[in-house]
Amino acid sequence: MASVCSLFVGVIDLDLPSLFDGDMEQLKILVVSRLPRLLAILCTGVGMSVAGLIMQQLCMNKFVSPTTGATISSAQFGILLALLFMPNSTLWGRALFAFATATLGTWIFVWFIQRITFKDVVMVPLVGIMFGNVIGGITNYLAYKYEMTQALSTWLVGHFSLVLRGRYELVYLVAPLVILAFLFANHFNIVGMGKDFSKNLGVHYNLVLFMGLTIAALITASIVVVVGSISYIGLIVPNVVAMFKGDKIRGTLVDTALFGALFVLVCDMLGRVVIAPYELPIELIVGILGSLLFVGLLFYRLKHGRRAIRLKGPTFGCGAGVSDLEGGADEC
Amino acid sequence: MFVKELTKKYDGKAVVDGVSFDIPKRSVISMIGPNGAGKSTVLNILSRLIARDSGLVDFEGQDISHWKSKELAKRLAILTQSNNIQMKLTVQELVTFGRFPYSGNHVTGEDMAIVERAIQYMELAPFRDRFIDELSGGQRQRALIAMVIAQDTEYVLLDEPTNNLDIYHATNMMKIVRRLCDDLGKTVILVLHEINYAAFYSDYICAFVDGRVARFGTVREVMNKEVLSKIYNVDFEILEIEGKPLSIYY
């Protein structure tokens, strides 16, 4: 699977120039816009799915992700704060704010779900979604009050059309962070098996937990600052890969990263092709494809004889469906 | 290893109250007692999973809280009931984690040999590539024990290892516990609810009542009509089977 992924990535990489040079006929565009865009896409796909993978393992819940764990909304809140307090802030300035709030938001969320040990796996992503919405609400209120809604909208809906040389390099941060995650993969695995389990093996539970969350939050924040919010990837990709490959992070991290990159790449191409010469924001495409995949995932589990899935109303459609699915898996 | 005047309070109520005893090496010690008598709490304090309020846990001449967690993980292993792992790890991967305190991320050939022996010892070879969440309760329990064997500790602490197992698997588990001591020379301390398992498979029994040690002694000393009746508040009869005392309660 990994080899197929990398092959595809390679193929598309090769395709890009021929596809778009036909329109633009300029190497400059390739260097200034196409190449950065491709790299940003790859970093986003890799980063979001790896961040999702880490968060799912550490929280012992298959449905925690940067979206359902309030990381993305916290990062957006940070960007707004940066815009408010430092109107002339650079990309890096905003990034610092986003790093701080994303990390803090994720910490608070995890601290909260650890405090209240929920019997029901449903509750964890639900609480995350609610917490994220609260932060999102504050963000929107502040933006509205200070007439920043338009500026903020850039970061609310993820898209790659503003990715140009000089204003996207921040996503490269994803690379060292993912490598760091790979180095600590076994630690994350052990912590994911519980506090007692990690203590037995002499692993410092809280330290690894918060370090892992910080890595996931930093990855997410650096993507949100450059591209904007992209949901679903951190949820779907690790789950799909784990279905085939299991949960040993050392073994699945590379697959997750490649599959994530491929997924975003395909979504981005679709977004650009469907209504060419205009383009749809990536968030939209990922949302549609992601939810389809997600429903597929639910049905796959259903077919394999697990407990029936009751969907609980559309408001929390994603969270509710998700948790019941996990509940079903518990029984086996 | 010994404990002295161990105390643990929850909300002002002492769950463990002045518990002291020595742990004889190379033996199986069962902790029994009614629900809420504090036996699991003591086991968790022994293994530094929960902190004590006062008292001393001496492990090889040093207070257990002064041990570096990685060093301690090479000498003392604990399996709690909360190990209901839902993770999709293969048996082989799980058992390999037992080598983590020694090798961290760099598993050596020697580690692999130890893991292999542990898998063979627990007769898990046919399941090595199966995901643990697909195994039966008994198989999963064996996989966890295999991990503890790979961890190669002198002390093994088990919290109700027969819980949720049927008679066949529970008896097998107790036989394994015995072999851990007899074949591999480990000191095994376990919490048990089934008194007869404790009587048949252990060397010493430590009986708890209301957070205190009601009786600590050899199996024969504790498996006594009066002692057991006082601990559990029910009538007991003691029988001899295969030269070991077994109890009937009604």
Image (spheres, rainbow, N blue to C red):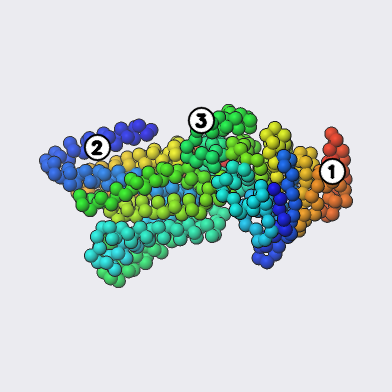
Q: Is residue A292 left or right of residue B9?
A: left
- The residue under the point 54% across, 53% down is A120
Asked if labels 2 and 3 touch by Cβ distance under 8 angstroms, the answer is: no
SS at badge 2:
helix
**Snapshot quadrant of residue B204:** top right
Give, as a three-letter code, the residue at label 1: Arg
Q: Is residue B77 above or below residue B172?
A: below
Which amino acid type is shown beneath numbered disc 2?
Answer: Asp
**Contact, CB < 8 Å: mark 2 with mark 1?**
no
Instruction: State the residue at coordinates (59%, 42%).
Output: B74
In this view, A105 is above or below B72: below
Residue where numbered disc 3 is placed: B109
Q: Position of residue B213 (x, y in %)?
A: 77, 54
Quarter of image, res B162: top right
Determine the residue located farthest toward the front in the rendered image: B61
The alpha-carbon separation of the residues under discs 2 and 1 comes to: 76 Å
Q: Tag 1, which chain? A: B
In the displayed orientation, state which residue is furthest to the left: A25
Residue under label 2, please give it: A13
Q: Which residue is mark 1?
A: B220
The span from disc 1 to disc 3 (Cα, nearest Å) is 45 Å
Q: Residues within 10 Å of mark 2 (few under 14, many from 20)?
A: some
Residue at mark 2: chain: A
> Is the residue at mark 2 from the same chain as the one at mark 1?
no
Q: Secondary structure at mark 1?
A: helix
Badge nearest the viewer, 1 or 3 = 3
Q: Please tell me whether mark 2 or mark 1 is closer to you in this view.
A: 1
Is residue A225 rendered to the left or right of residue A112?
Answer: left
Vertical relation: B111 (above or below) B8: above
Image x and y of residue A135, in percent:
39, 63
Q: The residue marked by circle 3 belongs to what chain?
A: B
Tell me the amino acid under the disc marked 3: Gly
